[in-house]
Amino acid sequence: MVAALVRSDLRIRYGRGKVRVLKWLLDPVAALGIYLVLVAVVLDRSGTAAGLSLACAIVPFQLLITSVLNALQAVILRSSIIVNMGFRRTLIPLSSVATESVAVLASFTMLPLMMLVYGVAPTAAVLWVPVAFAVTVALAAALAYPAALIGVWYPEMVPFSVSLLRALFFIAPGIIALDAITGTARDLLPINPFTGIFELFRHALLYGDSPPAWQVLVPLGFAAAILALCLPLYRREQGELAKLVG
Amino acid sequence: MSAVVAEHGVRSGAGEVRLRGVGVRFDFDGQGRVLTPVLSHLRRRRGSAWGLSDVDLHLEPGSALALVGATGSGKTTLLRVLARVLPPDAGEAEIEGRVGSLLAADAGLQLLLTGRENSELLGVLAGQSVREARAGLEAVAERSRLGDAFDRPVHTYSAGMRARLGLAVIQSISPRVLLLDEVFEALDHEFRGIVERFARGLRERGGIVVAAGHDHDALSRICPQAAWLEGGRVRMQGPFAEVIAAYRAA
């Protein structure tokens, strides 16, 4: 069922025919490319492979924010189905994340591209990339449930929710790597679940070593806590969705 | 008060519907926004209205019931309970058998998807496997008689074309319970005949049909029984002609 929902989402987004693959490839480049050009060319930032370091944060963040954006609108966009037939609505937020996971895969081409640009050779640590991706998807799935509820409970809060997520990016080592930060900020930043995810990708692709355990455990802990709180709420609420959108 | 709706898992036998004291309540906050049980912990409830109240209904295999009543009388809410779209807030609802429902003007269709893509999606959501849904696509195309439009986005369809597609998808999932809400109003003469034949055939196979609307002539051809709803309650239930006569006289 999730696969059917994802296919329908992707068809709506990328259309049909041969051009859709091109759209799928170009879409993330258009979305992310501007950041990378800004850092690598316009700002000409010094430091170790600044563009690659930034890509290690922006690519997973793209998955997180697009998943939440999709989930915020998922129930409303499926309202015609929700008021017409009964089906497992707990799968709606999950299908948002699955859709964005497929969509963002094209963005991952930016990572080897940046490694090539900066002459960073892959090491065995690249095997951590699937783990980093899985942790990102887990956090995105956890965030999708409260996002779906906010989208129908408080539609006027949708822009604020997106701003909040962007703020989390800026209070994580997104633009600057954690190693380059000192003092109290350095101690506090790991509390942000995005920090672990961004640094996981950097260890896998930039530093070429194994990440410390907290970089996996903190985001997963957040995901588990959010799911423990919000999944029961969503499950209780799913039967009532037709009242809200009907 | 308990609220039990049969799970989406479907028994292959004949359809059966039992409602006992079913009620559906709508709560509102101070701004008139709908509240749900969870939301009512976050916003203060300022008012309530029962969209459906104390409804008892037993539909045996092979039966067909027309729902009549003024706009806002609870017909659509009752159909949504039967479609497992809304769980009852009071009483119990048991619906056995796969449900095929046409309850909305867009019939659950995604406007940016083509007829073919919608058919596959709705088939899967109704409980078919992807393989089953895909295998049935040509049959849906034929039954809907949409021709080339079957591969065009649904936003280009008229209301009648959407209803035809929705019905063709329902036929493909072989429902045991068929629910129709003001469908005849959108259909042309030829397709009304198709709906009527499908509904009669379903009843002969032990299925159940529940149809609501204001086209009483069309409803009378499908449903020998009728229920007149008023203010969310069943005011009268019985043979179609008697119920309609009482409703028109009121």
Image: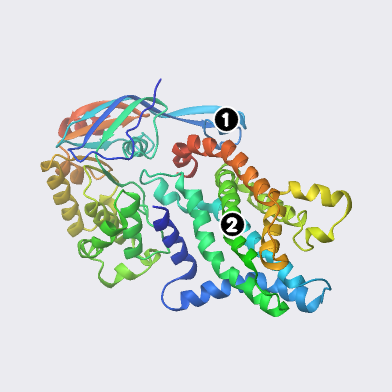
Picture residue at 53% right of the left edge, 55% below the top? A97
Q: Which residue is mark 1?
A: B40
Do the residues at discs 2 and 1 belong to one chain? no
- Give percent across and percent down for residue B22: 35, 26
Picture residue at 27% right of the left edge, 40% below the top? B10
Query: At label 2, which amino acid type do we have?
Result: Val
Foreground residue, B206 or B146? B206
Residue lying at the far top of the rendered structure: B1
Instruction: Please say if B61 is above or below A90.
Output: above
Residue A118 in the figure: left or right of residue B165: right
Instruction: Answer whether residue B85 is visible to the viewer in this image.
Output: yes
What's the CA distance linking mark 2 and mark 1?
A: 40 Å
Question: Secondary structure beneath disc 2?
Answer: helix
Badge 2, how many Cα within 10 Å: few under 14, some, many 20+? some
Residue lying at the far front of the rendered structure: A124
Q: Which residue is mark 2?
A: A131
Instruction: Answer whether residue B53 is visible to the viewer in this image.
Output: no
Picture residue at 42% right of the left edge, 62% below the top? A7
- Give percent across and percent down for residue B135: 24, 62
Residue B173 in the figure: left or right of residue A42: left
Instruction: Please say if A22 is above or below B108.
Output: below
Question: Secondary structure beneath disc 1?
Answer: helix
Subunit under mark 1: B
Instruction: Please say if B195 is above or below B47.
Output: below
Query: At label 1, which amino acid type do we have?
Result: Ser
- Give percent across and percent down for residue B172: 23, 55
